[in-house]
Image (tube, grey):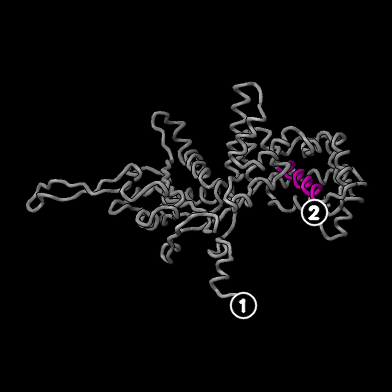
Amino acid sequence: MAKDTATQEAELKYHERLNISVLPISKIKSLLRNDIKDTILAWQNGRNVDKQCYRIVGPAGVGKTAICFQIAAELTEDLFGEHNRKNPNDKKTFNIIMVKSPVLCRDDFIIPFPSKGMGPGEEFSFKMLYSDFVPKEKNSFGMFVIDEFSRGDHQLQQLLWQIQNEYAVHRFQFPKGWFVFSIDNPDDSQYSMDTLEDAAGIRRQLHVYTEVNVIDFLNHAIANDFHPLVVEFIQAHPEYIYDFVAQKLGSVYANPASWEKLSDHIWKMQIARKDIDLDEIEIKASGLMNTNMAALFIEFAKGIKTINPKDVFYKYQEVEPKIKKLLKEGDNAKLGELMVGFCTYMTTSMPKYDDTHLTNVEKFLLIMPIDTSALFISQIDSFDRNAAAFKYMTQIHLTLLRKSKNYKVNFYDKIVKAGEGNLPT
């Protein structure tokens, strides 16, 4: 029996219903930052282009809020860095005002205030008072960010629609240099939302959707010095970056934000006590991402049963017996996880290597089943050709091709014959 249109629409993901692009969070950050910069530079060069209102949609904890603060900081440097260095007493900032819709109401932005008039017939009148949430400085620049727009009450949403559509509150116009962002979770069953949408409102926004991207998270984690235990755990088990199953069940769930918080807990304990109490960390981890994920993390931290992808690169001889055991048991699931973890470690850490490390990589790829080791090639091919990870992995691959006939014949040529590989030789 054919499904009716309403049922078909309900089964679509939110980004499919909106029919919009799905991008990694890092791409969204650069896209929106560059668009704001382009807009301002167009104004400065005499082209009065319209401002764009942006809407970022994606799962909770994926980094939507964080990139807004990063965009503001980067635009401060891009637009005013040179000025600020030359004029330390007159520094300019690309500001950010972030409002949390679930905890606010319309009166937090604007209220009428009785005022005694001065002219005839103006004995009593009302003036509108605007809160500190409303940017007022005439020549300022910044981002007005509406977090969780769809969880605000109806009256607040109506006021926020005006901000998004007109860059104004009531009759007060925002300064020209202020841009409006709206952040939302997807309109799916696991989120409590009251989505207020109409054709006019949708057409005024530039909508982008982000999904969990482990490479983005690890690049951010490494650049911001997350604790090595967290970085290496996600490199070994990228599938644990976001626990969608736990989220759908309504339990505490792992997500990029919770991993960052766990990193902070480990660092502060290590700094303050000169040691890490894993029992205490497990309790904290369970409160951040549930007991099951906490147990997996602690098992990894204690080095029980887990093959660390980092050790494949640096200490292959030590982990080879464990890999052979998995091969003997035919545990293709764990072998696949190990290969994904190894590729994730290599493409995010990009460790320096010598002939010994290259030999470790070669031995690892040759011992694995060909359909599993082929992930090494497909991982390389998945990157943008200008990405640092693509150049790094390609260089390793080409070096091995030149140095080792065994690698070429028993690894790469087999993949080519199977139609899996397409990198240049």
Q: Nearer the viewer, residue 241 or 304?
A: 304
Q: Is residue 193 above or below residue 64?
A: below
**Image mark for residue 26:** none
- Sort mark 1 into few (<14), some (14-19) or many (20+) by Cα contacts within 10 Å: few
Which residue does the image show at 86% across and 39% down from the upper left?
A: 322
Left or right, 89 with respect to 35, comes to left
Q: Are marks 2 and 1 in contact (CB under 8 Å)?
A: no
Q: Where in the figure is residue 104, as x and y percent of width and height?
A: 37, 47
The part of the image, by quadrant, that contains residue 52 is: bottom left
Which residue does the image show at 65% across and 34% down from the upper left?
A: 282
The answer to if 11 sits in the magenta stretch is no
Left or right, 289 with respect to 363, comes to left
**Image mark for residue 2:** 1
Amino acid type indicated by mark 1: Ala
Amino acid type indicated by mark 2: Leu
Q: Where in the figure is residue 199, as x and y percent of width and height?
A: 43, 66
Dot 2 or dot 1: first in sequence order is 1
Q: Is residue 140 above or below residue 375?
A: above
* Local secondary structure at mark 2: loop
Q: Nearer the viewer, residue 10 or 67?
A: 10
Query: Which residue matches tag 2?
Result: 423
Span of residues in magenta: 333-347
